[in-house]
Amino acid sequence: MQDTATLLVCCPDRKGLVAALAQVLYGHGANILDADQHTDPVAGQFFQRIKFDMGELHTDRRSLETAIAEVAERFSMSWRMCDRKHRYKTALFVSKYDHCLYDLLLRQQSGELATDIPLIISNHPDLEAVAQQFSIPFHHLPITKENKAEQERRTLELLHEAKVDLVVLARYMQILSDDFLRAFSGQVINIHHSFLPAFMGSKPYHRAFERGVKLIGATAHYATAELDEGPIVEQDVVRCSHRDSVKDLVRKGRDLEKVVLARAVRWHLDDRVLVYDNKTVVFS
Protein backbone atom coordinates (compact mmCIF):
# COMPACT_ATOMS: atom_id res chain seq x y z
CA MET A 1 0.00 0.00 0.00
CA GLN A 2 2.96 2.35 -0.56
CA ASP A 3 1.03 4.29 -3.22
CA THR A 4 -1.89 5.12 -0.92
CA ALA A 5 -2.58 8.54 0.56
CA THR A 6 -5.06 10.01 3.01
CA LEU A 7 -6.85 13.33 2.63
CA LEU A 8 -8.31 14.99 5.74
CA VAL A 9 -10.56 18.02 5.35
CA CYS A 10 -12.54 20.36 7.58
CA CYS A 11 -14.75 23.25 6.46
CA PRO A 12 -18.13 24.93 6.91
CA ASP A 13 -20.85 22.53 5.86
CA ARG A 14 -22.51 23.16 2.49
CA LYS A 15 -23.83 21.26 -0.50
CA GLY A 16 -21.43 19.81 -3.06
CA LEU A 17 -18.45 19.11 -0.78
CA VAL A 18 -18.35 15.34 -1.21
CA ALA A 19 -18.90 15.56 -4.96
CA ALA A 20 -16.21 18.22 -5.41
CA LEU A 21 -13.56 16.20 -3.60
CA ALA A 22 -14.47 12.95 -5.32
CA GLN A 23 -14.43 14.66 -8.70
CA VAL A 24 -10.96 16.17 -8.28
CA LEU A 25 -9.51 12.84 -7.15
CA TYR A 26 -11.20 10.91 -9.96
CA GLY A 27 -10.13 13.50 -12.50
CA HIS A 28 -6.48 12.94 -11.63
CA GLY A 29 -6.75 9.15 -11.73
CA ALA A 30 -6.88 8.50 -7.98
CA ASN A 31 -8.92 5.48 -6.89
CA ILE A 32 -10.86 6.07 -3.66
CA LEU A 33 -10.42 3.08 -1.34
CA ASP A 34 -12.29 4.34 1.72
CA ALA A 35 -14.23 7.46 2.64
CA ASP A 36 -15.75 8.54 5.95
CA GLN A 37 -17.41 11.80 6.84
CA HIS A 38 -19.06 13.62 9.72
CA THR A 39 -21.17 16.76 9.99
CA ASP A 40 -21.44 18.71 13.24
CA PRO A 41 -24.85 20.43 12.96
CA VAL A 42 -24.21 22.60 16.02
CA ALA A 43 -20.90 23.98 14.78
CA GLY A 44 -21.98 23.79 11.15
CA GLN A 45 -18.75 22.01 10.25
CA PHE A 46 -18.05 19.21 7.78
CA PHE A 47 -15.24 16.68 8.21
CA GLN A 48 -14.04 13.97 5.84
CA ARG A 49 -11.28 11.39 5.59
CA ILE A 50 -10.58 9.90 2.18
CA LYS A 51 -8.04 7.13 1.61
CA PHE A 52 -7.08 6.65 -2.01
CA ASP A 53 -4.66 4.85 -4.34
CA MET A 54 -2.23 7.08 -6.27
CA GLY A 55 -0.71 4.22 -8.27
CA GLU A 56 -2.44 5.19 -11.51
CA LEU A 57 -2.45 9.00 -11.32
CA HIS A 58 -2.74 10.73 -14.71
CA THR A 59 -0.64 13.57 -13.29
CA ASP A 60 1.88 13.96 -10.46
CA ARG A 61 1.33 14.62 -6.77
CA ARG A 62 2.03 18.34 -7.07
CA SER A 63 -0.69 18.75 -9.70
CA LEU A 64 -3.12 16.81 -7.53
CA GLU A 65 -2.35 18.97 -4.50
CA THR A 66 -2.79 22.11 -6.58
CA ALA A 67 -6.22 20.92 -7.68
CA ILE A 68 -7.20 20.05 -4.08
CA ALA A 69 -6.01 23.50 -2.97
CA GLU A 70 -8.29 25.12 -5.55
CA VAL A 71 -11.28 23.19 -4.20
CA ALA A 72 -10.22 24.05 -0.66
CA GLU A 73 -10.12 27.75 -1.44
CA ARG A 74 -13.57 27.61 -3.00
CA PHE A 75 -15.08 25.93 0.08
CA SER A 76 -12.97 27.69 2.79
CA MET A 77 -11.52 24.30 3.59
CA SER A 78 -8.54 23.38 5.74
CA TRP A 79 -6.89 20.17 4.57
CA ARG A 80 -3.83 17.99 4.70
CA MET A 81 -2.71 15.08 2.58
CA CYS A 82 -0.50 12.33 3.97
CA ASP A 83 0.98 9.44 2.02
CA ARG A 84 2.41 6.11 3.12
CA LYS A 85 5.77 6.82 1.53
CA HIS A 86 6.47 9.05 4.51
CA ARG A 87 6.86 6.87 7.59
CA TYR A 88 6.28 8.90 10.73
CA LYS A 89 9.00 9.23 13.33
CA THR A 90 7.92 9.18 16.96
CA ALA A 91 9.86 10.26 20.05
CA LEU A 92 8.90 8.77 23.41
CA PHE A 93 9.23 10.88 26.58
CA VAL A 94 9.31 9.01 29.90
CA SER A 95 10.21 9.49 33.55
CA LYS A 96 10.27 6.47 35.86
CA TYR A 97 7.12 4.49 35.01
CA ASP A 98 7.80 1.84 32.35
CA HIS A 99 4.39 0.31 31.57
CA CYS A 100 3.42 2.65 28.71
CA LEU A 101 6.97 2.67 27.35
CA TYR A 102 7.21 -1.12 27.17
CA ASP A 103 3.76 -1.38 25.63
CA LEU A 104 4.48 1.11 22.85
CA LEU A 105 7.87 -0.41 22.06
CA LEU A 106 6.43 -3.90 21.82
CA ARG A 107 3.56 -2.74 19.63
CA GLN A 108 5.97 -0.90 17.34
CA GLN A 109 8.29 -3.90 17.18
CA SER A 110 5.40 -6.19 16.22
CA GLY A 111 4.31 -3.82 13.44
CA GLU A 112 1.11 -2.68 15.14
CA LEU A 113 2.30 0.95 15.18
CA ALA A 114 3.47 2.14 11.76
CA THR A 115 6.27 4.41 12.95
CA ASP A 116 10.00 4.57 13.60
CA ILE A 117 11.22 5.47 17.11
CA PRO A 118 14.57 7.23 16.71
CA LEU A 119 15.00 8.24 20.35
CA ILE A 120 13.70 8.11 23.90
CA ILE A 121 14.05 11.17 26.15
CA SER A 122 13.81 11.10 29.92
CA ASN A 123 14.40 13.36 32.89
CA HIS A 124 15.56 10.31 34.87
CA PRO A 125 18.12 7.58 34.04
CA ASP A 126 15.96 4.69 35.30
CA LEU A 127 14.64 3.41 31.95
CA GLU A 128 17.85 3.51 29.93
CA ALA A 129 18.10 -0.28 30.13
CA VAL A 130 14.70 -0.56 28.43
CA ALA A 131 15.91 1.64 25.56
CA GLN A 132 19.06 -0.48 25.24
CA GLN A 133 16.94 -3.63 25.14
CA PHE A 134 15.20 -2.25 22.03
CA SER A 135 18.39 -0.69 20.58
CA ILE A 136 16.98 2.85 20.72
CA PRO A 137 19.15 5.86 21.66
CA PHE A 138 18.32 7.11 25.16
CA HIS A 139 18.88 10.73 26.17
CA HIS A 140 18.91 11.54 29.87
CA LEU A 141 18.12 15.23 30.30
CA PRO A 142 17.58 15.94 34.01
CA ILE A 143 15.37 18.95 34.62
CA THR A 144 15.49 21.45 37.46
CA LYS A 145 13.81 24.80 37.86
CA GLU A 146 17.08 26.47 36.93
CA ASN A 147 17.89 24.49 33.76
CA LYS A 148 14.39 23.74 32.38
CA ALA A 149 14.59 26.25 29.49
CA GLU A 150 18.08 25.08 28.50
CA GLN A 151 17.08 21.41 28.57
CA GLU A 152 13.98 22.09 26.50
CA ARG A 153 16.14 23.81 23.88
CA ARG A 154 18.39 20.75 23.81
CA THR A 155 15.33 18.50 23.54
CA LEU A 156 14.01 20.46 20.56
CA GLU A 157 17.41 20.21 18.91
CA LEU A 158 17.37 16.42 19.29
CA LEU A 159 13.83 16.19 17.90
CA HIS A 160 14.62 18.33 14.88
CA GLU A 161 17.87 16.42 14.20
CA ALA A 162 15.89 13.16 14.23
CA LYS A 163 13.11 14.73 12.08
CA VAL A 164 10.49 13.70 14.62
CA ASP A 165 6.83 14.03 13.59
CA LEU A 166 5.14 13.00 16.83
CA VAL A 167 6.00 13.26 20.53
CA VAL A 168 4.34 10.79 22.93
CA LEU A 169 4.41 11.55 26.63
CA ALA A 170 4.39 7.99 27.98
CA ARG A 171 3.98 9.05 31.63
CA TYR A 172 6.50 11.87 31.34
CA MET A 173 6.15 13.71 34.64
CA GLN A 174 7.12 17.17 33.42
CA ILE A 175 5.06 20.11 32.19
CA LEU A 176 6.16 21.24 28.74
CA SER A 177 6.51 24.96 28.11
CA ASP A 178 4.28 26.96 25.78
CA ASP A 179 7.24 27.46 23.45
CA PHE A 180 7.80 23.71 23.16
CA LEU A 181 4.12 23.02 22.51
CA ARG A 182 3.97 25.72 19.86
CA ALA A 183 6.93 24.09 18.10
CA PHE A 184 5.02 20.76 18.01
CA SER A 185 1.45 22.04 17.92
CA GLY A 186 -0.99 19.17 17.52
CA GLN A 187 1.90 16.69 17.55
CA VAL A 188 2.19 15.90 21.28
CA ILE A 189 0.03 13.14 22.76
CA ASN A 190 -0.17 12.77 26.53
CA ILE A 191 -1.68 10.03 28.67
CA HIS A 192 -3.40 11.28 31.81
CA HIS A 193 -4.11 8.74 34.51
CA SER A 194 -7.67 9.90 35.01
CA PHE A 195 -10.93 10.19 33.12
CA LEU A 196 -10.67 13.89 32.31
CA PRO A 197 -12.06 16.37 33.21
CA ALA A 198 -12.32 14.62 36.58
CA PHE A 199 -9.23 14.56 38.83
CA MET A 200 -6.89 16.75 36.84
CA GLY A 201 -3.30 17.22 37.98
CA SER A 202 -1.32 14.84 40.17
CA LYS A 203 -2.32 11.73 42.14
CA PRO A 204 -5.76 11.25 40.57
CA TYR A 205 -6.06 7.66 41.81
CA HIS A 206 -5.54 8.78 45.38
CA ARG A 207 -8.25 11.41 45.00
CA ALA A 208 -10.54 8.92 43.27
CA PHE A 209 -10.08 6.59 46.25
CA GLU A 210 -10.91 9.38 48.67
CA ARG A 211 -14.02 10.24 46.68
CA GLY A 212 -15.16 6.61 46.58
CA VAL A 213 -15.76 6.53 42.83
CA LYS A 214 -17.06 3.37 41.17
CA LEU A 215 -15.28 4.00 37.85
CA ILE A 216 -11.73 5.08 37.16
CA GLY A 217 -10.34 5.88 33.75
CA ALA A 218 -7.51 7.11 31.55
CA THR A 219 -7.43 9.83 28.91
CA ALA A 220 -5.16 10.32 25.91
CA HIS A 221 -5.19 13.90 24.65
CA TYR A 222 -3.16 16.39 22.68
CA ALA A 223 -1.03 18.46 25.04
CA THR A 224 -1.69 22.20 25.02
CA ALA A 225 -0.66 25.20 27.11
CA GLU A 226 -3.73 24.58 29.29
CA LEU A 227 -2.67 21.67 31.49
CA ASP A 228 -4.81 18.54 31.02
CA GLU A 229 -7.33 20.44 28.88
CA GLY A 230 -6.16 19.61 25.34
CA PRO A 231 -8.38 17.89 22.74
CA ILE A 232 -9.27 14.37 23.87
CA VAL A 233 -8.44 11.55 21.46
CA GLU A 234 -9.42 8.47 23.48
CA GLN A 235 -10.73 7.48 26.91
CA ASP A 236 -11.69 4.29 28.70
CA VAL A 237 -12.87 3.22 32.15
CA VAL A 238 -12.84 0.22 34.47
CA ARG A 239 -15.12 -0.51 37.39
CA CYS A 240 -13.88 -0.41 40.96
CA SER A 241 -15.48 -0.89 44.36
CA HIS A 242 -15.16 -0.18 48.05
CA ARG A 243 -12.89 -3.22 48.28
CA ASP A 244 -10.21 -1.63 46.08
CA SER A 245 -7.26 0.03 47.76
CA VAL A 246 -5.27 2.87 46.22
CA LYS A 247 -2.78 0.21 45.08
CA ASP A 248 -5.61 -1.66 43.33
CA LEU A 249 -6.76 1.51 41.57
CA VAL A 250 -3.22 2.25 40.40
CA ARG A 251 -2.86 -1.30 39.05
CA LYS A 252 -6.18 -1.16 37.20
CA GLY A 253 -5.44 2.33 35.96
CA ARG A 254 -2.05 1.41 34.52
CA ASP A 255 -3.61 -1.37 32.48
CA LEU A 256 -6.00 1.20 31.02
CA GLU A 257 -3.28 3.78 30.41
CA LYS A 258 -1.37 1.43 28.11
CA VAL A 259 -4.37 0.56 25.98
CA VAL A 260 -5.77 4.09 25.75
CA LEU A 261 -2.42 5.62 24.82
CA ALA A 262 -1.72 2.94 22.20
CA ARG A 263 -5.11 3.53 20.55
CA ALA A 264 -4.58 7.28 20.40
CA VAL A 265 -1.08 6.92 18.97
CA ARG A 266 -2.24 4.40 16.36
CA TRP A 267 -5.13 6.62 15.25
CA HIS A 268 -2.81 9.62 14.94
CA LEU A 269 -0.30 7.62 12.91
CA ASP A 270 -3.12 6.35 10.68
CA ASP A 271 -4.23 9.97 10.03
CA ARG A 272 -7.64 9.39 11.57
CA VAL A 273 -7.83 12.44 13.86
CA LEU A 274 -9.08 15.95 13.09
CA VAL A 275 -9.03 18.67 15.76
CA TYR A 276 -11.43 21.59 16.02
CA ASP A 277 -12.76 23.76 18.87
CA ASN A 278 -10.59 21.84 21.36
CA LYS A 279 -12.37 18.62 20.38
CA THR A 280 -11.53 15.80 17.98
CA VAL A 281 -13.21 13.83 15.25
CA VAL A 282 -11.70 10.34 15.19
CA PHE A 283 -12.62 8.39 12.06
CA SER A 284 -13.04 4.64 12.47
Image (cartoon, rainbow, N blue to C red):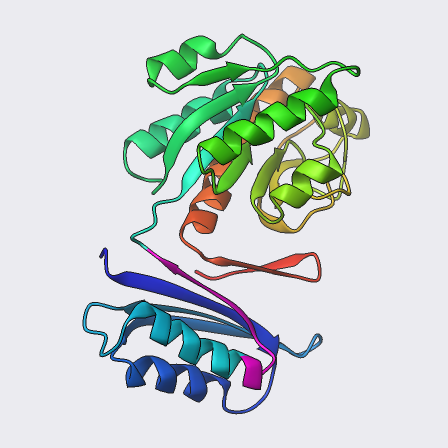
- Any magenta on residue 79? yes
Which span is picked out in magenta?
A: 73-83
Where residue 154 appears, as percent x and y from the top left, is 60, 24
Viewer-closest of 243 and 255? 255
Residue at x 71% of width, y 42% of height: 196
Viewer-closest of 142 and 107? 142
- Any magenta on residue 54? no
Horizontal relation, residue 26 to residue 97: left or right: left
Viewer-closest of 248 and 218? 218
- Which residue ends up furthest to the left in the rendered image? 56
- Which of the 4 image quarters holds residue 107? top left
Residue at x 69% of width, y 15% of height: 143
Where residue 176 appears, as percent x and y from the top left, is 70, 32
Against 103, residue 6 (above or below) is: below
The quarter of the image holding the C terminus is bottom left
Where residue 76 appears, as percent x and y from the top left, is 61, 80
Asked whether residue 255 is in view, the answer is: no
Q: How many callouts does the rendering have?
A: 0
- Which residue ends up furthest to the bottom in the rendered image? 15
Residue at x 41% of width, y 13% of height: 130
Horizontal relation, residue 21 to residue 46: left or right: left
- Which of the 4 image quarters holds residue 200? top right
Where residue 193 appears, as percent x and y from the top left, is 64, 31
The quarter of the image holding the N terminus is bottom left
Against 75, residue 276 (above or below) is: above
Residue at x 44% of width, y 25% of height: 119
